[in-house]
Amino acid sequence: MDAKTVGAVAALTGVSVRTLHHYDHIGLVVPSVRTPAGYRGYTNADIERLHLVLVYRSVGLQLEDIRTLLLDDGDADVLEHLRRQHRLLLEQADRLQHTIKAVEELMDAHRSGIQLTAEEQIEIFGTTAFGEEYAVEAEQRWRQTDAWKQSQQRAAAFTKQDWIDIKAEGDALLQALAEAKRDGVQPGSPVAHELVARHRAAIERFYDFGGEMHRNLVEMYVADERFTRYYDDVEPGLAQFVRDIVIASIDE
């Protein structure tokens, strides 16, 4: 049987030799093989068990709980353990994603000058498109422009109800754009023109907005992957669709 030494397993898995010895000492992952020289060796099954332990640790289980779990399910097949791990990881990923979005939304709100309580921020904001990196980039790029200064002044004056209305209108517009794309709405059509007008009006709540500015903005929707991802996460190809209907409307 081709068994691996503790040093080899440490190098393979990234787990320190000290930790492996500890797992051995408490009976969590015990190497199954004794070499002729008296050293213990890890079989593939031992390493598989170690990976089970590592995944359970990554989702917050304590070592004693993991040991009990593995002992209780000693006869369960590996696939069943993997299914359990997969479920735990999905739950953890979902919690982390919600936390990340909440933090990014609060950063965006702070950058925009929003003065809301924590409860109000949680009540209003549910998702976010861009994080702190983009907020900093936008400020560095446009802070000397009249549009940027105007948007900061208007945002600072918005009330809680203003932000609730803005978010509701933005969500409704995003869904309307997605439905239009799914329905095959063509650039230049009456429905497309109406959507373009709503899109322009949403932006004009923050600053005065002309045709060429609108063109430049939607070109960025397909040039900057952050914008593209924001729209395409709602409906694949939506960023390109928004760009096309806006350009068609401007060019008529």
Image: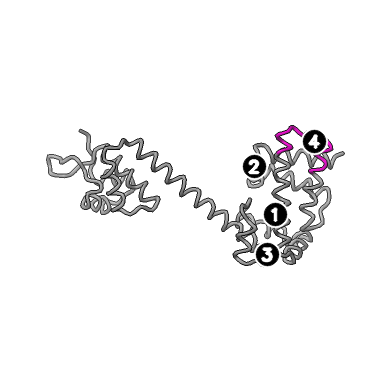
Who's the residue at 62% across and 52% down the image? Answer: 128
Q: Position of residue 84 (x, y in %)?
A: 39, 42
- Label 1 neighbour load within 10 Å: few <14, some 14-19, many 20+: some
Quarter occupied by residue 161: bottom right
The numbered dot on residue 234 is 2
Secondary structure category for the residue under label 3? loop
User: Relative to residue 102, is residue 220 drawn left or right?
Assistant: right
**Residue carrying label 4:** 187
**Residue carrying label 1:** 167
Who's the residue at 63% across and 54% down the image? Answer: 134
Secondary structure category for the residue under label 2? loop
The amino acid pointed to by label 3 is Ile
- Label 4 neighbour load within 10 Å: few <14, some 14-19, many 20+: some
The amino acid pointed to by label 2 is Val
- Could you tell which of marks 1 and 3 lies nearer the N-terminus? 3
Magenta-tinted stretch: 179-195
The amino acid pointed to by label 4 is Pro
User: Relative to residue 124, is residue 246 drawn left or right?
Assistant: right
- Could you tell which of marks 3 and 4 lies nearer the N-terminus? 3
Foreground tag (4 vs 2): 2
For marks 4 and 2, give the CA distance: 19 Å
Secondary structure category for the residue under label 1? helix
Foreground tag (4 vs 1): 1
The count of marks equals: 4
